[in-house]
Amino acid sequence: VRFTELDNKNELIIKEKEKILQFIAELESQKLKVLMDCYNAINTNFKDIFSKLSPDGEAKLELENKDDPFAGGLDIMARPGQKKWCLTQAMSGGEKTLTIIALVLAIQMYKPSPYYVLDEIDAALDDVNASLVADLIKDLSEKSQFIIITHRDVTMTRVDHILGVTNRAGVTAVLNLNINKVLEYFSEDPERAVSDGAE
């Protein structure tokens, strides 16, 4: 009787163990699917955005361990213009900035947020690339609000609203400028631009 009781308990434990192992395997399978869906979607966005920011260029994300993605990291690869493929570590400051901006925006497109704060992301870019980034953010701003801290004229000319802070003689003042209203003001009477500029 004692043997039968212990044997039954042993069979029950074995069955419970099999159920737990099966449940773990299902979780791991779901986890891998979620990861790969996310990876593939962001990678597609990344390739698309980078090609817009770097004409004739390409970019991609590569898993370090394709057989077991959880056992490795992720490489960020790019080929700006007609250059060779390389990791971000081997890029110039401007190329690296452009690549990372493309990646951040690719993630943004996958999981959009209501608003973003970007602090001087165009500082290391030349005017041409800063313009491309500003134009792309302008397009994306139809779905999310972007707050950009910048000193670049090419970026400021593409925004809807400017907030500026000045300090004269120890007095801080805030400039609040709605670009659309300013353009509307001058479009009503082009002579205003000349007369206001003369003042």
Image (cartoon, grey):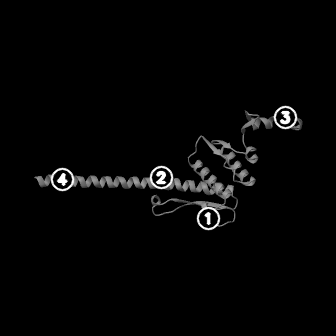
- Of discs 1 and 4, which sits in the foreground? 1
Q: From the image, tell me which residue sits under label 3.
A: 188
User: What label does residue 86 carry, if any?
Assistant: 1
Mark 4 or mark 1, which is nearer the start of the sequence?
4
Q: Secondary structure at mark 4?
A: helix
Inter-mark Cα distance, 4 to 2: 39 Å
Q: Secondary structure at mark 1?
A: strand
Mark 2 or mark 4, which is nearer the start of the sequence?
4
Inter-mark Cα distance, 1 to 3: 51 Å
Task: Identify the amino acid type marked 4.
Answer: Asn
Q: From the image, tell me which residue sits under label 4.
A: 8
Mark 1 or mark 2, which is nearer the start of the sequence?
2
Inter-mark Cα distance, 1 to 4: 61 Å
Mark 2 or mark 3, which is nearer the start of the sequence?
2
Task: Identify the amino acid type marked 1.
Answer: Cys
**Is 194 on the left-hand or right-hand side of 60?**
right
Inter-mark Cα distance, 4 to 3: 91 Å
